[in-house]
Amino acid sequence: MNNGKAFLACSGFAFAAILLNGTFAQQLKAQGNGTSAHHAGHDMADMHEKKDKAGSPVAGKTADAPEDMSQMDHSKMPGMSGHEGMPGMKHGMDMNEAGKYLMNLSSGTSMNPQSWPMPMLMPRLGSWNLMIMGQGFLVDTQQSGPRGGDKFYSPNWGMVSAEHSFLGGGFMFQSMFSLDPLTITNRRYPLLFQTGETAYGKALVDAQHPHDLIMGLGMNYAHSLGENTMLHFYYAPVGDPALGPVAFPHRASALELPQATLGHHWQDSTHIADNVLTVALRHKWFRLEASGFYGTEPNENRWNFDWGPVNSYSGRFSVFPSKNWMAQISAGRLADPERPFFVGGHAETHGDVVRTTASVHYTRPMEHGNAWSTSLIWGQNHVVQTDRNTNSYLVETMYPLTKKDFLTGRVEVVDKDELFANDPDLQAKLAQTAGSSFRIQGYTAGYTRDIGFFKNVETGVGANFTAYAIPSAIKPYYGDHPWGANVFLRVRLKPAE
């Protein structure tokens, strides 16, 4: 019955995506603003007119350069000089510089590399510029061993942003939602060695929690202070503070992996936070950000708004040396990030955490319209109460072999200290003999094939397999060679071709 609910909900998500895409495709065609690219750029008619007047391609363009507008470097277009290395310069649609900057944001104020061809729609609604993205998976997972399990579930998310010029700058409203509370039943899906958050009052172990119905709801205002400088303000009742890399559901290198990262709560778990205020200053190739927010993660009720005072703080420094590269380093102090869980009738808490992250992200557009994206991420949690550090490391890549074939890979090394949180006697016994933190290594390889089943939705089928290397002390509880496997159907909004 639970599997049926998940199937119906994700089918509804896909059907709504098709209708939405088709509706906006017709609107774009009627207005003459349609695009076959994975991102919107300058007015296509104007570009063709300029080419016709010139009578030949732009000087210096190589003979094998693609004619498809989706492969053109929009940062080199007229009026874009001085911004080639900065995000947000790939969108046109009657925007000023501040609007272009805002329309390249991902979750909250985070950014993927500028050259990533975002799979999104960019229609107009009156004088507003919209950005619409959405992705969903139907997944059958098998996790091995006595602590594993199997499940049919559907992780998914959708995003709608609306931008408009305002007071000489740009204003953008962001909204992000997920049907996870409906399509991931029992408040979890099996994922070996995953920890973080709670379900039914107990710590989640070997399982991943669903995301909230409202993943993000925020407002941005950006104003240019000169040719190369941008001031940016962001407030979100639910949003993403300046801490960590782009969260895994929205990261270019993780686009074809439905399952969460094991280092999620070391790297990017604050992507759904409450009462977020951020100020950012971008100048040429770098950006400085500072945030205040409510540090405790969402509760188990995934349908509601959580709320709390600003009690946590973070800062992030990002660099964009070229359109293909970006890197960030960030740190923050989180007040009680994990909610209490109950063991033997007693509430257990972890206290404040100081989180530090650093990451490098690379994207290279390919000739068939996709892009090769790779991320290297490090995250560390320092628990103030115990004065202990635990670390996580990740290398992740998504490589398009062809227009319809994708290879994925993920390697993780994570120090896990909550694997036996729900069994304090066993946890104490292991602490005496083997320690309380265990280094887990995960090696994932996968493949996705687009099948084009729906006209206006990128539909693919795929699978991935993860093999784990673990300390011998915990093999009696997980098996000598634990593994996990996922088979999935993926649907993703795409512009009409």
Image (cartoon, rainbow, N blue to C red):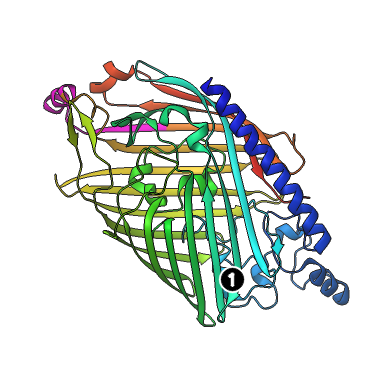
Where in the figure is residue 64, as x and y percent of width and height? 77, 58
User: Is any part of residue 34 visible from this angle?
Assistant: yes
Name the residue: 38% across, 64% down: 277
Instruction: Write down the quadrant of residue 452 in the picture.
Output: top right
- Tell me the crowding category of disc 1: few under 14, some 14 to 19, or many 20 or more residues within 10 angstroms, Cα based: many
Q: Is 435 part of what is drawn in magenta?
A: yes
On screen, residue 68 above or below 193: below
Name the residue: 34% across, 41% down: 299
On screen, residue 54 above or below 244: below
Task: Identify the residue position indicated by label 1 in the image.
Answer: 99
Where in the figure is residue 428, as x and y percent of width and height? 13, 26
Name the residue: 71% across, 51% down: 367
Foreground pick, 5 / 113: 5
Tell me where the magenta segment starts and ends, as one range. 425-442
Residue 402 falls left or right of residue 442: right
Where in the figure is residue 317, as x and y percent of width and height? 38, 65
Foreground pick, 127 / 92: 127
**Residue type highlighted by circle 1:** Gly
Furthest toward the front, the residue is 304
